[in-house]
Image: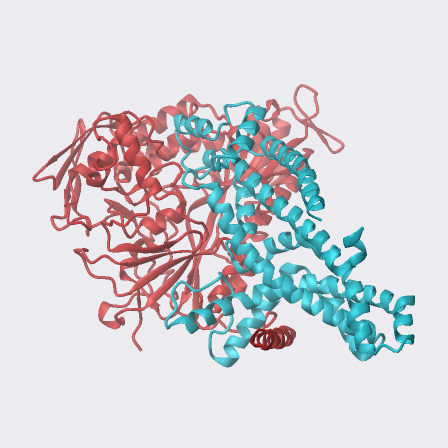
Chain colours: A cyan, B red
Amino acid sequence: MLAFALRRLLVSVPILIVSTFVVFVMVSLSANPLSNLIARNPPPPPQTIAAERHRLHLDQPLMERYWNWITGIFRGDFGPSVNSTTDIGSEVISRFGVTFRLIFLAMVIALILAIVVGAVSAVKQYSKLDYTATFFGFLFLSMPSFWLAVLLKQAGISINTSVGDQVFYTIGASSIYVQGGFWAHLTDVLGHMILPTISLALISYASWSRFQRASMLEVLNSDYVRLARAKGLSRGVVMRRHALRNALIPLTTVTALDLASIISGAVVTEKVFQWQGAGTFLLDAIAQSDVYAVEAWLLISATFVILFNLVADLLYGVLDPRIRHA
Amino acid sequence: MLGKTKLRRARIGALAATAALVLAACGGGGGDNSGVQTGQAFAECDSNVNACNSAAADQLQDGGDVTFAIEKNIPNWNVTSSEGNVFETGMVTKGILPYTFYTTPNLEPTLNTDFMESAEITSTNPQTVVYKINPKAVWSDGTPISADDFIYNWKVQNGRDCPDCAPASTGGYDVVDSVVGSDNGKTVTVTFSSPFTDWKVLWSSTGAMYPAHLAAQHGDQNTPAGLAESYKWFGETLPTWTGGPWKIDNFQNNVSITMVPNPSWWGAKPKLSRVIFRIITDASQEPTALQNNEVQVIYPQPQVDLVNQVRNIPNVSSYIGLGLTWEHYDFNLKNPALANKALRQALYTAVDVQGVINKTVGQFTDKVKPLMNHNFVPGQEGYKDVISSTGQGTGDINKAKQILTNAGYKLQGEQLIDPNGAPVPTLRMRYTVGNQIRQNECELFQQAASQLGVKVDIIPTDDLGDTTSNGDFDIIVFAWVNSPYPYSGAIQLWNSQSESNYGKYVNPEVDNLIAQANGETDQTKAADLLNQANQIMADDAYVLPLYQKPTFIAAYDNIANIRNNSTLDGPVYNMQDWGIRKG
């Protein structure tokens, strides 16, 4: 298993390098990091623009810039930002920290909901409960995440108004100043987390629950489940040990593959709720044509996606011993 | 066991919260239009722009927080540098930097009497200005604010003493010959090498002063390298020092900046305990933050939905003002087809500016009127209509056709043919991608041009700076920020040699008149000279002004003394006067 994991990691390295190169070339050719500076009113003196061009290495050939960047990463240098005071490395890492706080909780909630609702829907196929779950599943699937987030905000404000207290917050990960001790701070953080987490979780939940339902139905109709029941095993044992366990394997794949789309979903959620995470970092970097910042974002997010897929592969072995021994 | 209980509770909690929120969302709130505008705080602002929403200090409570939404982070603290010269940084540093003049809501440069006792021209040949600094004015460490600060800020911005300083502009400082202190540094005598009409812009609120004694600790002030080091240090370092009524108490990168009153402040003490600048980079999220009382003041670019949303929030007042930023169409005269003045005149005549306003910003305010000058806006001394006489912006298609006919153009079917018999080529019109208002402005221009037989392709750009500086357009729509100091601005925008003259307009007579205006210390004569230049430029049909861009402020009614200021000073120009009304 260890050899398998190492092999997978090694194969990922050239993929990463090629993707950073492609993005570097595309962003560099399509955007000018000096454009925001040039568009200033009043425009800066020519010597200022020349100095910035030099600082951002724009006076070097494209290949040289890329080479310097990729080798610099091994020294912890992610290249100069268009904001000269910003250290891209520490900034992007702290931003991903914020995003993963959001994503982790949202994924856990979405997975638990999806597994429970998907399994129950499958077991009670065509029941009222199944129809209700199906309705909400498709509702959340069809809702643009931006719109869902805005609706949740309005709902939160309505609840605040009706209870006459600040329960939900619409911007940021916490208040700037909180009166009180530990519990006041915890309540404040939770008040800020609930809406964005639900917003992000519901989008993933919608597709995962449908997937889990279909997967569960397939397993329930399989020969080995029927055999297990025929042998006299109780329904609960068959469900837990055989059906659910096997039905989780496809969901594991989907969850791993969905990480990239969850990160992009987080871009929208972060923007609407003004969390200063990786998503807003990327949007700002693109808006400012901050090539090295875009590259750093890509490198880190791609690394996480690759690692997550690896974890999913390893989980197969846990869920299905046949894979472990293969 | 505890873990399981917690998990179960969390699960139940999550489900309950989801159900409650979905039900609440379905129950309305978002689509409710029955709310009424209850705020009246800005009711007087149209008639009394400088003093509306005011309350005396004894009507205000001691303490209280006000949170003001800004739309950008502060990555560079040196507002005079090219990198730090951003509106948000200007607003955040307004309370900590000393400055000579600021601009009041009626767009007039006004002496900052907390800092200056006087600032007057004492000689016109050579032009000499004598500044007298308030004797009580000190930096927060007790160092007196003095001529040394004037000298340092002049040296780093004049382009000569510190070539590597990268200031936002050298305009004005480059014609200062000497800055000399006397009277223990509390009197400053500034001598100019050539007359400079806009002398009030120097050391003013748009490029306020940094402390020379701290600069000296971060670089040898007698060398260009030392000056550059200290200048850079001010950009990189969060100011813990102050020379204004406020000081920065806390900065959370990308999140907020908190100001508290400066204990060393020699003027009237602010009533508020804190002003918190909360960074909300997506303006469309500001109304909900306001509605949820997470911020109490917002100052976004107005859009129809945003304005309507804010008008429905109880206990919040909002106001639309008109400022110095103005929208305009520009031609690129490097395009051979547009080198012919008659075609330019005809196209601008065919455009209905009032119609453009009605279909864009007119949807949320009826205040906006066609702008008739390129250098002054209504309300500024010197504003004169130079457009009406040209007929441009009237939407008069027949007159436009007549101009073309007189110049030898012919319409063949739906194609305009130039006097040489060649079809007028399709023109490329640019605007910033995602800006719906500008897209509409392009489409309206396109419709007007099509009636003259001129085809216009609309191509958005995601890089306005590159597009303008490379001249990658035939026609473009964007905005300029007029200055309360219009003369040096005119040189920058219209002079034949200027880098910012993106459409490459060349008229030596205009250059000459603008240069004369810029060196005339008599304001009336200066305005007259600038308007003469402007009239020629308007007749040349190079740039067609559309309108002053509206600004939009919304604040809770209980905040007194806050009001709109559509200049680069913004609503924070009097932040030390803000307070919460008693009761």
Q: Is residue B201 above or below residue B125?
A: below
Residue that appears at 33% across and 47% down:
B238
**Direction from residue A112 to residue A285 in the image, left or right:** left
Residue B574: horizontal and vertical position, in percent? 29, 56
Q: Which of B508 and B350 is in front in this view?
A: B508
Q: Residue furthest left?
A: B183
Residue B514: horizontal and vertical position, in percent? 36, 29
Q: Nearer the viewer, residue A207 or A83?
A: A207
**Direction from residue B529 to residue A210 in the image, left or right:** right
The C terminus of chain B lies in which quarter of the figure?
bottom left
**Direction from residue B77 to residue B357 in the image, left or right:** right
**Direction from residue B513 to residue B521 in the image, left or right:** left
Q: Nearer the viewer, residue B574 or A194?
A: A194
Q: Is residue A236 above or below residue A64?
A: below
Q: Which residue lies furthest to the top in this view?
A: B420
Q: In this view, does B247 lie above or below A155?
A: above
Residue A253: horizontal and vertical position, in percent? 75, 55
Q: Is residue B180 above or below residue B291?
A: above
The N terminus of chain B lies in which quarter of the figure?
bottom right
Q: In which quarter of the image is residue B77?
A: top left
Q: In which quarter of the image is residue B12?
A: bottom right
Q: How many numbered dots are placed on residues in this image?
A: 0
Residue that appears at 62% across and 31% down:
A25
Q: Can residue A254 be seen in this view?
A: no
Q: Nearer the viewer, residue A170 or A316?
A: A316
Q: Which residue lies furthest to the front in this view?
A: A325
Q: Is residue B18 visible?
A: yes
Q: Quadrant of residue B33?
A: bottom right
Residue B103: horizontal and vertical position, in percent? 31, 48
